Amino acid sequence: MPASPIRKLVPYAEGAKKRGVKVYHLNIGQPDIPTPDVSLNAIRNFDQKVVAYSHSAGILSYREKLVGYYEKNNIHITPDDIIVTAGGSEAILIAISTIMDQGDEIIIPEPFYANYNGFSVNAGAVVVPIPSSIKDGFALPPIEEFEKVITPKTKAIMVCNPNNPTGYLYSQEEIEKLGHLAKKHNLYLLADEVYREFCYDGHSHFSVMHLPGMEEHCILVDSVSKRYSACGFRIGALISKNKEFMATAMKFAQARLSPPTFGQVASEAAIDTPEIYFKEVIEEYVARRNVVYEGINRIEGAFCPNPKGAFYITAQLPVKDSDHFCQWLLEDYNFENQTVMLAPASGFYSTPGMGKNEVRISYVLNVSDLKASMKVLEEALKVYPGRTV
């Protein structure tokens, strides 16, 4: 089981804090945006006398309300097409376990969310990575590269859109290409769309559920964690119109009994969050993105593309080994008693040796803290003994 590149350096961060060093956490996608009051009030006003198991597919009233949410996003489903899960993570784990037998293969453009590796290991599946490049902003690799690796063992293609860890937003044309490929080879197209709301610069999100004639192929993974800044609710969703897939997924859902009751109550209420909330959140994240994007590209020898979605940037730094650099930042360095915690990008690749000079930065801190973080990073790279240029 691979270690999490997002969390494995936590002991070093804790050590730095014990020494009195302020640590700016750029390693984890934990937003500091307030969770909507409407959802918190639903928990405060919970009046049932027993906190009981819900249906394994989730509370029906919540699933019915989710149908309305997706309808607004031009995704037409019924409550029976939804299994509520303990976060998007469980949705991915159940999906991969449902469609993959021991030794089956799933194709994923890399870099990708690190836990896809772990979930695949858990299911006995094999990740077949297709490298994307920072040079073109981590755009979808040529479809011919996918064709080359399809074998009788291939069962699915997976994509995260907008992407974690790169922030790349796949276009309608790119998603359609994947759809054609999945249909041609009778594969599942599994899409992690938890950052759907986070699209910038006038761009909009195109879902795999918008693909016509792909009902039997498409599986959607979703979550409330980032949408409502409510990671601790631990509520996600697994969505598909494929009845056979959903029936098998339900066996896994029944085996874990049910998703969290309080999280579902809060998430159902969160659907009533006013639109102004999202407008303000997007404006805030654009400002934060700009600070990091400009800050990285000001550093000599560093580079990152300008992401169009999510709240992550994958940056190339003038270092040989980002794992060592990230640990060094916490263990051996501070600038004016401050340091930064980054996620080494090697953990977001499946191909050995990839991402060794890259880091993922999560721009979930306020603008002031991000500006301070970029200054710390700039000064650190001036003195880091493993600097390459």
Image (cartoon, rainbow, N blue to C red):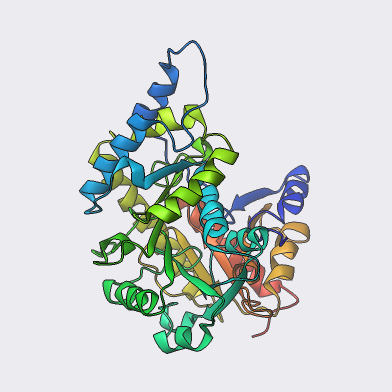
Task: Residue at 42%, 83% (x, y): give it.
Answer: 136
Task: Residue at 57%, 57% (x, y): give it.
Answer: 97
Q: Position of residue 276 (x, y in %)?
A: 24, 41
**Residue 273 visible at all:** yes
Q: Quadrant of residue 289?
A: bottom left
Q: Nearer the viewer, residue 185 or 37?
A: 185
**Residue 36 visible at all:** no
Q: Nearer the viewer, residue 28 or 263?
A: 263
Q: Position of residue 1 (x, y in %)?
A: 73, 60
* 326 up-or-down from 148: above or below: above
Task: Residue at 38%, 29% (x, y): give it.
Answer: 39
Position of 387 compared to 287: left or right?
right
Q: Position of residue 46 (x, y in %)?
A: 43, 17
Q: Nearer the viewer, residue 311 or 336?
A: 311
Residue farthest top in this picture = 49
Task: Residue at 51%, 71% (x, y): give it.
Answer: 155
Say which quadrant the C terminus sits in: bottom right
